[in-house]
Image (cartoon, rainbow, N blue to C red):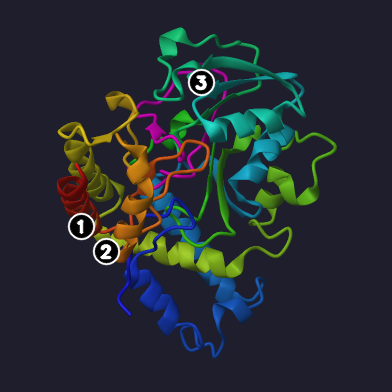
């Protein structure tokens, strides 16, 4: 059976070379006689896999030495609570910027641990843009400022880094991490679920500046205490070993492509194909402000919503799957993460042109 072009928002498409390597190594990793899934996380084989994955991620993102890299579990959603548990550090308030459904979820969980100041919100505009920093109402006494730098559902992306002064900037980068170079030194903490641009579901990456460690709330479970996990190389408990292994393969794949600068060029080309078409047709509509459009998640609607079901049915028959928009916003969404080949976007645009000719 031929592989489809999978536009799922997550779990999402993985690079074929990575899948093939993982398949080839399934029964016997590098002559060990074991699958990675069978290895002890404290054995020399997995320690090697873990160390190489971290080293490659540090190289790709140019992570400074004074930052810890953690491979945790619980998804990015767990970090909605884990971040305030670890970063309040005696303070009682944190600033949040509300740009979509995922930042709203982060706000809901943070309110269980501290007072949340919503310093800016785009909700009144249906989350169609990122509020300009000039309009933010930040509190200089906040423990941190939290942003969701790419909203998977709404397709809104920060293409700039906020300036929060001495207050640590915290970013949920789940759906665009590794899509382009990021200046890690501008952030106090970055977190991301793996299942969009890194690997299979089950691993969460946390990159945290060392000076922010060691002051977790007393109620913080051991496995969610960043300092304890950092001191134990993310192995305070058994980590998601196979997920870390596949993430490592993805990191190596990105390095072979030329790194994040090369990946950004490809991602801009892919997104440009779809946005250029959306901008020249009246049959479809892009709801996101042009300056804030995501390169990873591209929502769009048909002017005639009665055609939605036919669009999805015909797209699937053409090998273009998982294009239905999130239930909270409707319409369509094409997630074109790193592993989506440009041929997939070309096929989607050609299908959309044909559908418009037949139904317009």
Looking at the rendered structure, which numbered label has been put on residue 347?
1
Residue 169: give x, y in percent of width and height.
Answer: 53, 26
Q: Is residue 34 left or right of residue 110?
A: left
Start and end of the magenta stretch?
152-180
- Percent coordinates x, y for residue 66 in the rendering: 53, 40
Q: Which mark is residue 318?
A: 2
Is residue 137 located in the magenta-colored stretch of the structure? no
Image quarter of the C terminus: top left
Give the camera-side residue of 60 and 347: 347
- First of labels 3, 2 by sequence position: 3
Residue at point 57%, 39% (across, down)? 208
x and y percentages locating residue 174 in the rendered image = 49, 44
Instruction: Give residue 40's mark.
Output: none
Q: Quadrant of residue 80?
A: top right
Distance in Å between CA atoms under marks 1 and 3 = 33 Å
Nearest the eye: 213 or 27: 27
Label disc, if present, on residue 123 of the rendered structure: 3
Answer left or right for 238 relative to 49.
right
Q: CA distance from mark 2 to mark 1?
A: 9 Å
If you read the primary sequence from the N terminus, does the residue marked by circle 1 or circle 3 appear first? 3
Observer able to see residue 38: yes
Q: Are marks 2 and 1 in contact (CB under 8 Å)?
A: yes
Real-space Cα distance between discs 3 and 2?
36 Å
Q: Main structural element of the magenta stretch: helix, strand or loop?
A: loop
């Amino acid at each position: 059976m031929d592989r489809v072009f999978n536009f799922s928002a997550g779990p999402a498409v993985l690079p074929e070379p990575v899948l093939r390597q993982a398949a080839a190594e399934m029964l016997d990793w590098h002559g060990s006689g074991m699958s990675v899934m069978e290895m002890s996380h404290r054995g020399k084989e997995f320690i090697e896999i873990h160390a190489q994955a971290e080293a490659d991620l540090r190289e790709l993102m140019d992570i400074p030495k004074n930052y810890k890299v953690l491979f945790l579990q619980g998804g990015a959603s767990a970090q909605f609570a884990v971040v305030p548990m670890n970063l309040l550090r005696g303070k009682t308030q944190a600033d949040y910027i509300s740009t979509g459904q995922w930042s709203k979820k982060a706000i809901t969980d943070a309110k269980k641990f501290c007072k949340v100041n919503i310093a800016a919100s785009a909700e009144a505009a249906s989350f169609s843009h990122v509020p300009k920093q000039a309009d933010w109402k930040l509190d200089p006494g906040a423990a941190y400022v939290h942003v969701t730098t790419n909203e998977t559902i709404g397709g809104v992306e920060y293409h700039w880094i906020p300036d929060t002064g001495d207050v640590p900037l915290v970013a949920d980068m789940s759906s665009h991490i590794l899509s382009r170079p990021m200046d890690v030194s501008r952030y106090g903490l970055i977190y991301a679920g793996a299942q969009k641009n890194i690997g299979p579901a089950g691993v969460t990456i946390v990159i945290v500046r060392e000076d922010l460690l060691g002051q977790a709330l007393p109620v913080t479970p051991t496995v969610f205490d960043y300092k304890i996990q950092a001191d134990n190389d993310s192995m305070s408990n058994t980590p998601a070993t196979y997920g870390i292994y596949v993430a490592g393969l993805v990191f190596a794949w990105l390095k072979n492509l030329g790194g994040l600068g090369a990946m950004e060029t490809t991602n801009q080309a892919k997104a440009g194909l779809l946005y250029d078409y959306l901008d020249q047709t009246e049959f479809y509509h892009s709801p996101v402000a042009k300056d804030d459009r995501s390169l990873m998640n591209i929502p769009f609607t048909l002017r005639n919503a009665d055609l939605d079901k036919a669009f999805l049915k015909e797209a699937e028959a053409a090998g273009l799957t998982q294009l239905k928009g999130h239930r909270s916003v409707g319409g369509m969404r094409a997630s074109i993460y790193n592993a989506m080949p440009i041929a997939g976007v070309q096929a989607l645009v050609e299908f959309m042109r044909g559908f418009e000719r037949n139904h317009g």
